[in-house]
Image: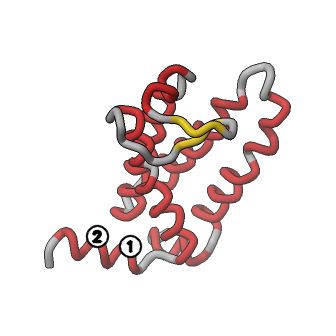
Amino acid sequence: MSRYLIVVEDFKSMPLILKFITAHGLFCFLFFLSAVIPGFDVNFSYKGQSMEFNEIWQNDLGVHLILIGLFFPTSAILLIKKWQYCRQFYAFVILATFVIPNANGDSFIYLPFALIVPCLLIVYLFKYNKAKVYFGT
């Protein structure tokens, strides 16, 4: 059986919520492309303003989009491959994505709210029976 078919079969065997987490991670690669390829339009908006390549970099979002666009797809691939530490890696990536923008003085008040979704996802990955069965734990 080819590697591609094995990956597809592993994805199909995932519980539904884990499929959404993985698909979201793969989709984030578009953020990387929008930050590095001028004219690659993914209709990205920030604070209600639609942004193209130049606006992304003028608003200091380029590096963040590159990191998100590389780390989330990597975590998605690792989830599909059932790497030993894939859940920990995903937990790090999702927490960093939500915590770093809210760690400065102005946004710190929102940090507890920003942690709700990542914490729920992490609990799902480590405690939900279907996810535990998928990862063999």
Contact between marks 2 and 1 (CB within 8 A): the answer is: yes
Residue, disc 1: 11
Whether residue 63 is visible to the viewer of this picture, yes or no, is: no
Whether residue 87 is visible to the viewer of this picture, yes or no, is: yes
Q: Position of residue 51 (x, y in %)?
A: 53, 35
- 100 vs 81, left or right, is right
Is label 1 in a helix, a strand or a loop? Answer: helix
The crowding category of the residue bearing disc 1, from other C-alpha atoms within 10 Å (few below 14, some 14 to 19, many at least 20), is some
Q: Position of residue 135 (x, y in %)?
A: 46, 68
Residue, disc 2: 7
Q: Position of residue 106 (x, y in %)?
A: 80, 22
User: Which disc is residue 122 wearing?
Assistant: none
Callout 2, which amino acid?
Val
Callout 1, which amino acid?
Phe
Is label 2 in a helix, a strand or a loop? Answer: helix
Q: Is residue 117 above or below residue 12?
A: above
Q: Measure the C-alpha gap from mark 2 to mark 1.
A: 6 Å
